[in-house]
Structure formats: structure tokens, C-alpha cells
């Protein structure tokens, strides 16, 4: 009897000691508060607002060069023989103007041991006044590299309202009549709340549902949409790690775009200087 009581006491103590705690420890509580805070703000980010504004302003400058025939003249006169003029702004099937940029190819091992070839392309829709963007489409096309069946897949992140809230923050020309202020261009006003990104839409197109080309160079998707999911849909909420992955992928692509388009604009300016130098070469 004493042995039985001892065993029961031991089991009771074991349950008390080894049972799963019901109270959140501090790191868990801090992470929970972090997740709730990000979701409450719907992934708003001033950097993304600034990048949207920066991209719109650079596209406005590039469009100005196109209208001034800077690119056309450089292609025809800067070299010994004319080269084909690069078409920078195209139109979709609805007649809306967009700018397309290819971000490269690579091999993905995310679904290891299956390997996939992928390419990245982005479509930017400027507003009619070219002061802002009306749509951003980030496109990833994949196909497996081995096996008897090759399944093409296309994933897109679509932002149908990529605006920067409020006008850009303009610093005064001088500080107390002294030296002028210096700031990074396209800085948004900190007094205006950043725009939320909860409406970012993830689209998935599968070769199981329809055939679509490996080379998809237009925003007009020829395939049938298989699945779509908002970044933050309260009725069908994605796990936070998945939400964060979408948000970071979009932000990183905008960073890459900003760098590449800035370099493109620099090259156009350089071509313009070369053209001017050529026409005044009197010696």
C-alpha cells in the first residue's frame, strides 16, 4: 500500500513538474505583441512608400527622355552604325501604358531535391500624369528541370494601389539663413501615416489548370488563375511567417528595381551627353 501511495505521489509530482506551462514566457509574449502590431498596421512601411515615389519619379524622367527623342537619337547617331531603338513603354490589351524590366534568371532549390529554373520580371504602370504609380506586378515564372513531366508555374505579387501617402517632404532651403539642408530625395512626410500593404495580392498560376508560355513578357496573363490570396485577409489569414515572406519579397524587389532603374536613367543621361558632344564636334 505504501508503495502504491509512493508511486501515486511521484506521478502527481511528475505531472506538476513536466506539464506544459499555460502562461506565455517573456520571449513568446514579445513575439506575439510584435506579430499583432505588424498585422494591426497591415505591414505599412515608409520605405515601401518612398520606393514607390522614387520609381514613379524616375519613370517620369525616362518618359521625358522618350518624348524628347533622347533614346532615339542616341541609338541612331552615337555609334558608327545605327542600332535598334529600345522600346521602354508598352501597352497592355486594355491600352494602358506600362514599363517592363527583366530582373534575371536562376535556379531554385527551395523544393529540394527538385530543382527549378525561374525568371523574374516586373511591370510598372505609371499614372497618366506620371507623378505616381497605379499598379505594380512582380512576376516569378518557374519550371522543374528534371522528371518526365514539366510543370510550368507562375506566381505574382500584385499591388493595385502603390501610392505614397501625401506630398513629398520638402525641406527648407536654408537653416536659420545658414547652410542649406541636405536630405535623401523622395522622402515622405513623417507626419502622414504610411500606407498599409494589406491588399497586396498573391496570384498562383499552375500548368495543371492551363497551358502558359515559359516566356511571359506581358502583364496580360494567358494562363488561368489557380489561386489568389491577399496578404492580410481577416477571413482567411495567412500564417505570419508566410505573410512576412511575401512582404519581404515585395520590398526587396522594389529595392532592386530602384537600383536598376536609377542605373538605367544614368545611362540615358550619359547617352544624351554623348549625343550633344557629337553634334558639337567641330574639330
Image (cartoon, rainbow, N blue to C red):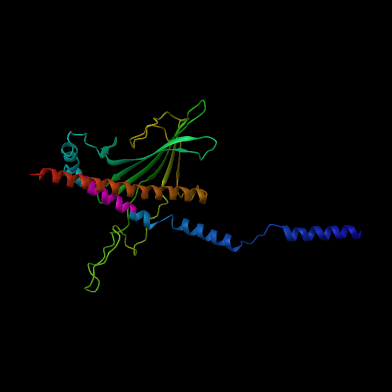
Please identify the dominant SS of the magenta region: helix
Q: Residue at x 22, y 72 (%)?
A: 178
Residue 197 appears left or right of 111: left
Q: Nearer the viewer, residue 104 or 143?
A: 104
Q: Return the residue found at the far right.
A: 1
The reply to whether residue 237 is visible in this rendering is: no
Q: Nearer the viewer, residue 218 or 127?
A: 218
Quarter of the picture holding the N terminus: bottom right
Q: Residue at x 13, y 43 (%)?
A: 278
Q: Quadrant of residue 196?
A: bottom left
Q: Residue 233: say if magenta.
A: no
Q: Residue 61: say if magenta.
A: yes
Residue 79 image position (x, y, % from top left): 18, 37
Residue 132 image position (x, y, % from top left): 28, 51
Residue 35 image position (x, y, % from top left): 51, 57
Total tally of numbered discs in the picture = 0
Magenta part of the protein: which range?
51-63
The reply to whether residue 49 is visible in this rendering is: yes
Amino acid at each position: 500500500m505504501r508503495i502504491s501511495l509512493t508511486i501515486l505521489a511521484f506521478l502527481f509530482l511528475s505531472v506538476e513538474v513536466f506539464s506544459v506551462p499555460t502562461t506565455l514566457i517573456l520571449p513568446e509574449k514579445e513575439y506575439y505583441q510584435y506579430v499583432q502590431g505588424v498585422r494591426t498596421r497591415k505591414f505599412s512601411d515608409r520605405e515601401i512608400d518612398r520606393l514607390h515615389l522614387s520609381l514613379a519619379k524616375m519613370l517620369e524622367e525616362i518618359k521625358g527622355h522618350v518624348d524628347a527623342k533622347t533614346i532615339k537619337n542616341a541609338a541612331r547617331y552615337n555609334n558608327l552604325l545605327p542600332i535598334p531603338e529600345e522600346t521602354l513603354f508598352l501597352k497592355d490589351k486594355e491600352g494602358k501604358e506600362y514599363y517592363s524590366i527583366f530582373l534575371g534568371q536562376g535556379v531554385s532549390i527551395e523544393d529540394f531535391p527538385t530543382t527549378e529554373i525561374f525568371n523574374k520580371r516586373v511591370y510598372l504602370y505609371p499614372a497618366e500624369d506620371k507623378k505616381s504609380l497605379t499598379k505594380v506586378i512582380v512576376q516569378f515564372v518557374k519550371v522543374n528541370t528534371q522528371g518526365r513531366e514539366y510543370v510550368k508555374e507562375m506566381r505574382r505579387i500584385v499591388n493595385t494601389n502603390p501610392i505614397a501617402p501625401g506630398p513629398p517632404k520638402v525641406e527648407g532651403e536654408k537653416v536659420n539663413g545658414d547652410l542649406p539642408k541636405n536630405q535623401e530625395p523622395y522622402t515622405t512626410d513623417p507626419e502622414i501615416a504610411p500606407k498599409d500593404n494589406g491588399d497586396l495580392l498573391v496570384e498562383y498560376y499552375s500548368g495543371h489548370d492551363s497551358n502558359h508560355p515559359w516566356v511571359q513578357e506581358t502583364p496580360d496573363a494567358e494562363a488561368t488563375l489557380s489561386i489568389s490570396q491577399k496578404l492580410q485577409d481577416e477571413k482567411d489569414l495567412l500564417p505570419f511567417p508566410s505573410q512576412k515572406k511575401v512582404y519581404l519579397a515585395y520590398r526587396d524587389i522594389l529595392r532592386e528595381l530602384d537600383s536598376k532603374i536609377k542605373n538605367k536613367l544614368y545611362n540615358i543621361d550619359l547617352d544624351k551627353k554623348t549625343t550633344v558632344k557629337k553634334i558639337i564636334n567641330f574639330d
